[in-house]
Amino acid sequence: MNDKKNTSQNTERSNEYHLSEAAEQMINEGIKLATKIFEESKDKFGQYNDELLQYTEQLTKTVRKKPVTSLLVTGGVVFLLVKLFKR
C-alpha cells in the first residue's frame, strides 16, 4: 500500500515538474517572439521616421524657395477641404 502511495506521489511530482518545464519553455518562447516583434517594429518605425524627416526637409526647402506659391497652394487645399467637409 505504501509503495502505491509513494509511486503515486512520485508520478504527481514528475508531472508537476514536466508541466513546470513546459510552462517555462512556453514563456521563454513568448518572450523571444515578443522581442523579435518589438525589434522589427522598432526598425520599421526608424525607417518611417527617416523618410518623414526627409520629406519635411524637402518641403521646408520648397517653401523657402517659393513662399508665395506655397501659400497659395496651402490656401487652395484649405478652401477645398472646407468645401468638402461642409457638405
Image (cartoon, rainbow, N blue to C red):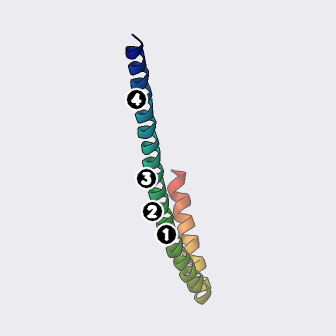
Q: Residue at x 45, y 57 (%)?
A: 37
Left or right of 3 in this view: 47: right
Whole-number angstrom distance, CA of label 1 to CA of label 2: 12 Å
Name the mark nearer the viewer: 3 or 2: 3
Question: In the image, which disc is placed on residue 48?
Answer: 1
Nearest the camera: 63 or 11?
11
The amino acid pointed to by label 2 is Glu
Q: Determine whether the residue tagged by mark 3 lies in a helix, strand or loop.
A: helix
- Label located before the other in sequence (1 or 4): 4
Measured Cα–Cα span from mark 4 to mark 2? 37 Å
Labels 3 and 4 touching (C-beta < 8 A):
no
Which comes before the other along the chain, label 3 or label 4? 4
Q: Quadrant of the N terminus?
A: top left
Q: Mark 4 — residue? A: 15
Q: Are marks 1 and 2 in contact (CB under 8 Å)?
A: no
Q: Amino acid at mark 1?
A: Tyr
Q: Nearer the viewer, mark 4 or mark 2?
A: 4
Residue underneath mark 3: 33
**Residue 45 screen position, x and y as percent:** 51, 65
Left or right: 24 as drawn, with respect to 7: right
Badge 1: residue crowd in 10 Å (few <14, some 14–19, many ≥20): few
Query: How far apart are the alpha carbons under marks 3 and 1?
Result: 23 Å
